[in-house]
Structures are given as C-alpha cells and as structure tokens.
Amino acid sequence: MDGFIASFKNNFIDDNRYMYLVEGLGTTLLVTAFAAILGILLGFLVAIIRSTYDKTGKMKIPNYICVIYLTVIRGTPSMVQLLIMYYVIFASASVGKPLVAILSFGINSGAYVAEIVRSGIMSVDGGQFEAGRSLGFSYAQTMLYIIMPQAFKNVLPALANEFIVLLKETSICGYIGLMDLTRGGDIIRSRTYEAFMPLIAVALIYLALVMFLSAMVRKLEGRLRESER
C-alpha cells in the first residue's frame, strides 16, 4: 500500500504532474468537439450529394468527387492522414497543431458520417419523397422538410457511436507533438520512468468518457423508441 501511495504521489502530485493529464484532456475534448462539428457538416453535404445522384442522376461530377473522397479517406489510416496533414499539407504554413488535428479528424469523420447519413436517407420510404413533390415542394424543400428529419432520427444512434470512435481516435494526436490526453500520460511516464500508473490513468479517463457517452446514446435510443410508439 505504501508503494502504491508513493507511486501515485511520484506520478501525479510531485511537480503537479497531474496537470499534464488535465491539459491533455482539455485538448482531447476540444479536438473531438470541433472535429465532430466539421464531420457532421461535411458528412451531411456529401450524403446529400450522393443520395441526390442516386435518386435523380443529377450532380454527376460532385458525386464522382465525393466517391473519390470516401474511397481515399476510408481506405487509409487516420494516423497517416494526420501525418500528411501536418508534415505535408501544412508543412510550410504556420497553422496551430490543434487546428491541424481538427481538420484531419473532421475530414476523416466526415467520410463515415456521410455513409451513415446516406444510408438513413435511402432508408426513408420512396413514397415520402413522392408525397412531398405532390404537395408542390421542390426537391430541395422535400429533402429539407420531409426526408432529412426522418433520416436524421434513424441514424442518430449511429452518429453518436461515430463520435465515440472519434474521441478514441484522437489519442494519436501525440504523433504531431500535440499535448492531448495520451501525450500527457506519456510525458509523465518519461519523467518518472514508471509506465503503469500514468498509462492506466489515461485508459481510465478514456473509459469514463466512453461510458458517459455510451450512456447518453442508450438514453437517446430509449427516447427515440418511445417517440415511435
């Protein structure tokens, strides 16, 4: 017991080393939140373009660009994308590391959000679209007021799970020297030469965050089921 207390004090109390975890957690939450927003915006745009092409055959060139985007992003590791974003695309630009991480993870998440939302749009009965057009709505109005609300409701749990995955993926931010939660634990390890305590602390913090988000997803799914009755 004395050894555990001494190790805890050495890893977290001495020199206020716990602040590495606090600062890293803040960065992790910041990157995750803004990357999720970017992913939603990009994903919905791509989903609308692709579903429009599937339904009407229009927007052929934008759809082709979207297919290339989805193929490249979903076919390459997120860590490689992050390194390319930092060391290649923004190599000669004075762009902050958090912004680079947000762009990289947002673009990556957008590809998965796009397919989730597109599946939701395509799952809406075709009669809903025809009903909207018969009421005099344009294609855009039908998508906005009739199709998208139903599609969003159908895919909301899947979107929430995507954001849980996004939270865990940000653990690779340290590869560009960004002070995220995992990097904070690694810095403590390098100062104390003890791996167990700081890495377990990082794992427990991620676990707590994921459990909280998972509980929110389950609660959301429950409310959606109640609204369908």
Image: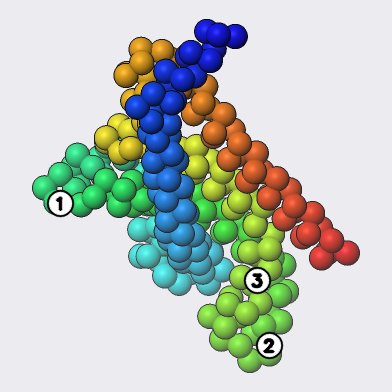
The part of the image, by quadrant, that contains residue 87 is top left
Reply above or below: 109 against 64: above
Kind of residue sitting beneath label 3: Pro
- Asked whether residue 102 appears in the rendered view, the answer is yes
Mark nearer the viewer, 1 or 3: 1
Question: Residue 12 or 155: which is nearer the viewer?
Answer: 12
The part of the image, by quadrant, that contains residue 27 is top left
Mark nearer the viewer, 3 or 2: 3
Check disc 3: other Cα within 10 Å, few if <14, some if 14-19, many if 20+: few
C-alpha gap between disc 2 and disc 1: 53 Å
> SS class of the residue under badge 1?
loop
- Asked whether residue 171 appears in the rendered view, the answer is no
Tag count in the figure? 3
Kind of residue sitting beneath label 1: Ser
At 58% from the left and 77% from the top, the residue drawn is 144
Kind of residue sitting beneath label 2: Ser
Mark 1, residue position: 94
Left or right: 122 as drawn, with respect to 28: right
Mark 2, residue position: 134
Mark 3, residue position: 149
> Considering only order in the chain, which callout, 1 or 2, is on the residue closer to the N terminus?
1
Residue 137 has which mark? Answer: none
At 51% from the left and 26% from the top, the residue drawn is 201
Reply above or below: 144 against 69: below
Question: Residue 65 or 143: which is nearer the viewer?
Answer: 143
